[in-house]
Image (cartoon, helix red, strand yellow):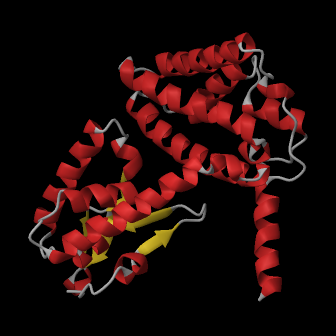
């Protein structure tokens, strides 16, 4: 068992994916929180999931299933359950953990402070530069699309390109993802969301979140109805923008640099600084 003398252990088991999103593995958190049996720790996770639902947040967004295969004696293997946890999920686990453990109190403080820091960052969004806003919004769309895909899959969606194009067609007056890419002059397979300004990304983020909520709310269970729902959401958002006198998404300017180019530039600058 790891001895937790400070918050460095929580930092040491934190992972960062290729998109810069932080997460924790439940199996690693179990060890740091001094739970010897997965069965008991999984009960805490179940309570945390329930708290997540009760707070109106998406369980699948914060508790991502991540089963893994481990090696057993004599060359055998075994599949075990695991989760990729967001900071908020870790906070809820700490809140539902054994309060008699000193390490649980430390975890509650650590994840509460980290969550508060993120809230402050979000409140200071207006102080960010346009490129920083783009980075922030793009990160949210990645998370949102992942969550939407999970819900869409449960609703019966198999052709995800068609499903996402339904949303784009509603928002962009009939344009598919390929149409948008061609209009923006993008190379083959270049990501259109990486080539949007913060306002255009915000419109798409709203489409993504509302499509997820509609699929859940209407209890959609066929691919056809899911596609129709996504188109309807995109279309209604477009009409709202029009009624408010806003600029249509396809009329918003394409940024000079894609987010991929900006990321490469940032990495180059860091190397040169070293």
Nearer to us in this view, 53 or 115: 115
Q: Quadrant of the C terminus?
A: bottom right
Residue 51 as seen in the image, left or right of residue 131: left
Placement of 50 over or under 91, stated as above or below: above
Residue under the point 49% across and 33% down: 158
Vertical order, 221 against 100 (above or below): above
Counting from the top left corner in percent of width and height, residue 195 is at 79, 45
| Numbered-mark total | 0
Q: Nearer the viewer, residue 191 or 270?
A: 270
> In screen coordinates, is 256 left or right of 156?
right
Seen at 69% across and 38% down, the residue is: 201
Q: Which of 132 and 84 lies nearest the eye of the viewer?
A: 132
Image coords of residue 84 (percent x, y): 38, 60
Asked whether residue 34 is in view, the answer is no
Query: Residue 122, can we see it?
Result: yes
Position of residue 97 in the picture relative to residue 62 (left or right): left
Based on the displayed image, in which of its 4 quarters is residue 70 positioned?
bottom left
Q: Is residue 79 above or below residue 200?
A: below
Residue occupying image coordinates x 68% and y 46% = 126
Where on the picture, by quarter, is residue 13? bottom left
Residue drawn at (15%, 73%) of the image: 35
- List x then y, in percent, for residue 174: 75, 18
Q: Is residue 60 above or below residue 32?
A: above
Name the quadrant of the N terminus.
bottom left
């Amino acid at each position: 068992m790891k001895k937790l003398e400070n918050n460095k252990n929580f930092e040491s088991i934190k992972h960062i994916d290729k998109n810069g999103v932080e997460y924790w593995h439940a199996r690693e958190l179990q060890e740091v929180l001094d739970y010897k049996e997965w069965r008991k720790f999984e009960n805490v996770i179940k309570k945390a999931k329930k708290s997540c639902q009760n707070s109106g947040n998406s369980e699948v967004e914060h508790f991502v299933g991540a089963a893994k295969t481990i090696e057993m004696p004599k060359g055998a293997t075994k599949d075990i359950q695991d989760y990729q946890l967001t900071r908020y999920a870790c906070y809820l686990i700490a809140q539902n953990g054994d309060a008699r453990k000193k390490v649980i109190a430390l975890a509650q403080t650590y994840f509460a402070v980290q969550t508060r820091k993120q809230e402050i960052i979000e409140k200071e969004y207006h102080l960010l530069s346009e490129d920083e806003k783009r980075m922030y919004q793009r990160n949210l769309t990645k998370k949102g699309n992942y969550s939407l895909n999970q819900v869409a899959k449960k609703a019966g969606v198999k052709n995800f390109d068609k499903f996402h194009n339904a949303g784009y067609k509603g928002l962009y007056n009939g344009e598919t993802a390929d149409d948008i890419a061609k209009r923006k002059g993008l190379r083959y397979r270049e990501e259109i969301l990486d080539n949007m300004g913060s306002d255009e990304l915000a419109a798409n983020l709203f489409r993504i979140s509302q499509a997820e909520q509609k699929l859940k709310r209407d209890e959609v269970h066929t691919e056809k109805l899911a596609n129709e729902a996504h188109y309807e959401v995109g279309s209604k958002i477009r009409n709202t923008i029009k009624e408010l006198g806003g600029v249509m998404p396809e009329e918003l300017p394409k940024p000079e640099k894609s987010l991929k180019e900006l990321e490469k530039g940032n990495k180059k600058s860091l190397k040169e600084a070293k």
